[in-house]
Image (cartoon, rainbow, N blue to C red):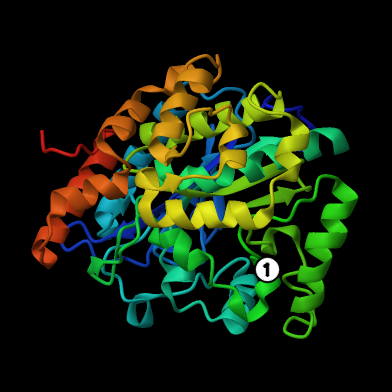
Amino acid sequence: MSEAVLRLFEGFGIEIEYMIVDPEELSVRPIADALLHSVAGAFESEIENGDVAWSNELALHAFELKTNGPAPALRGLAEVFQRNVREINTRLAPLGGMLLPGAAHPWMNPETEFLRWPHEYGEIYATFDRIFGCVGHGWSNLQSVHLNLPFAGDDEFGRLHAAIRVLLPILPALAASSPILDGARTGLMDTRLAVYRTNARRVASVSGHVIPEPVFDIRSYHSQILAPIYRDLEPHDPDGILRHEWVNARGCIARFDRNAIEIRVIDTQECPAADIAIVAAATAVTRGLVEEALSSGAAQRGIPTADLVRILGATTRDAERARIDDPAYLALFGWQGGACTAGALWEGLIERCVARDVLAAPCIGPLETTLSEGCLARRILGRLGERFDRDRLRGIYRELAACLAEGALFRAQPS
């Protein structure tokens, strides 16, 4: 987000991460620095390309596109990101690479294929690696979408944090896209999120329980979340290299440097249209919660963290088929029909919130595919079948790469 202080829902900061792979074999290609150098003439960590910025990530095969400052609306963003995807693929072609969507590479071996970004900010990445050991799927093989929503002042922060905290557990029901690691089914729809939850276990306060603590004012956030992280990191990082709010690895984090809360539990989808649709759904439901159209702010603040963690675990495993039987949690979304699946809950929320939200409704199209055919992880598994080999897996992910290149949705049945 920019330096200007925006009020609730007056801007949107969106970041989408992709993998760079070999066009033939789809193996990871650690050439993000070469791509940026081909544009900037130097090993820059970020370059601006109009409304979108391109930047590096920790791993040299990962690449990020993000809004160049806050976007005033969601309408048209999918097309903006898609144009940048096409331009990047054009630039990657002579370097022997292309972009691959999805939240995790399906057969990458981090032990042998991970290379760390060595240029600008390299000291930060080296410190992460020294403390946490970044050779592992949780650091070197995960791609996600981050949504930044702004707040102005303490009251807006508290309302927004309460709402997002409630929403986090059901986001994997829409967004899970990582059912394969090491060439095999993992038994989880959102494997990226599962490994993300444990990648900072050496300093457990860094990620906590992924669902943030029930903290609803800025001073308490500093004292109860950030201060313990900094204290626990100090023996490992005496120079304070990581003493910044972005070291917090919860599922949503306060970014006081940009007056925004950043949501981090959304897996990267098959194309920007699908990513922006999920962002729109998250925004519309957050808005409904913040404005107390679905439930009171007091009820949202009162839900126990342990209950939210349990539901997040269920959707991480089963996505839209996860059963939610907590009446207090369901009541936060105005649900009155008893136990239900996360998919059924989302179907009601999309009808009640997304379709009626002027900011989100124009992006609703791809959500209909998710509701009718399942999350992207479910569609991938359905197309793979019960038994598959590397060639079959490569063929499916080659089709996903084509979806990204063309801006098309990946369907449960081949077209």
Question: Toward the viewer: 178 or 311?
Answer: 311
Disc 1 marks which residue? 206
Q: Is residue 119 left or right of residue 87?
A: right
Q: Secondary structure at mark 1?
A: helix
Does 66 sit above or below residue 34?
above
Q: Residue at x 27, y 30 (%)?
A: 372
Between residue 33 and residue 16, name the one nearer to us: 16
The quarter holding residue 329 reads top right
Q: Residue 368, percent across and down?
A: 33, 26
Count of numbered tags? 1
The quadrant of the rendering that contains the N terminus is top right
What is the three-letter code of the residue carrying label 1?
Answer: Val
Toward the front, the furthest residue is 338
**The C terminus is located in which quarter?**
top left
Q: In this orientation, which residue lies closer to the viewer: 8 or 6?
A: 8
Q: Residue at x 45, y 25 (%)?
A: 348
Q: Is residue 301 above or below residue 5?
A: below
Q: Residue lying at the far right in this picture: please name it.
A: 219
Q: Relative to residue 40, is residue 292 drawn left or right?
A: right
Residue drawn at point x = 57 percent, y = 39 percent: 327
Q: Position of residue 5 (x, y in %)?
A: 80, 32
Q: Residues within 10 Å of mark 1 (few under 14, many from 20)?
A: many
Report if residue 2 is visible in the image. no
At which x and y percent is residue 26?
Answer: 22, 61
| Residue 312 shows up from this direction | yes
User: Percent x, y for residue 89?
Assistant: 30, 46
334 is higher (above) or lower (below) than 108: above
